Image: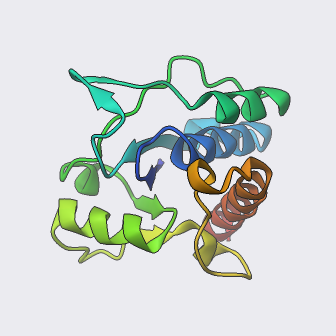
Amino acid sequence: MVKILFVCHGNICRSPMAEFVMKQKVKKAKLEHQFEIASAATSTEEIWNGIGNPVYPPVKKLLAKNGINCDGKRARQMTKEDYSKYDLIIGMDNWNMRNMLRIVKSDPENKIRLLMDYTERPGEVADPWYSGDFEATWRDINEGCDGILKTLLE
């Protein structure tokens, strides 16, 4: 089983979008029994009294428009233990990468990667929280998830 953790700053926009897009892609490929897919945050900004906020409404709406249900998803912070649990830990931007390494301390197995490194245009997934461009984030995440799946199936 391949275990993938998608990570962004707050776990309410990009990483849950990637989590649920990837879940949909492996389900369509009839491979869902071969994957465990989740998402987390590097910060605690979206976690109050131990309870994470739900997926940001514009992201939830975009996922629903594309036939993806994310009900029940709540923000959670990445932990050091996630490093041993997951095979791939995928960040959305360089700031996430720095914070992920801060949490896990080191990456001896080279598990921590940027999502867009699985595409022909490596770089960062823009944060729609600031840009407001959820469609661009949607395209990046779909392209990145396609790239991960292709890489894993080769």
Q: Is residue 42 at least partly visible in the picture?
A: yes
Q: Is residue 111 at least partly visible in the picture?
A: no
Question: Looking at the picture, how far across and down is residue 86, in whole percent?
Answer: 36, 53
x 20%, y 66%: residue: 102
Q: Nearer the viewer, residue 36 or 44?
A: 44
Q: Quadrant of the C terminus?
A: bottom right
x 37%, y 46%: residue: 41
Q: Nearer the viewer, residue 22 or 103?
A: 103
Looking at the rendering, which quadrant does residue 140 occupy? bottom right
Question: Looking at the picture, how far across and down is residue 88, in whole percent?
Answer: 43, 61
Question: Looking at the picture, how far across and down is residue 85, in whole percent?
Answer: 29, 49
Q: How many marks?
A: 0
Q: Nearer the viewer, residue 46 or 24?
A: 46
The structure's colour scheme is rainbow
x 59%, y 18%: residue: 71
Q: Seen in the image, is 54 located left or right of residue 137?
A: left
- Relative to 40, residue 50 above or below: above
Q: Seen in the image, is 75 located left or right of residue 137?
A: left
x 39%, y 59%: residue: 87
Looking at the rendering, which quadrant does residue 66 occupy? top right
| Extreme residue in the top direction | 72
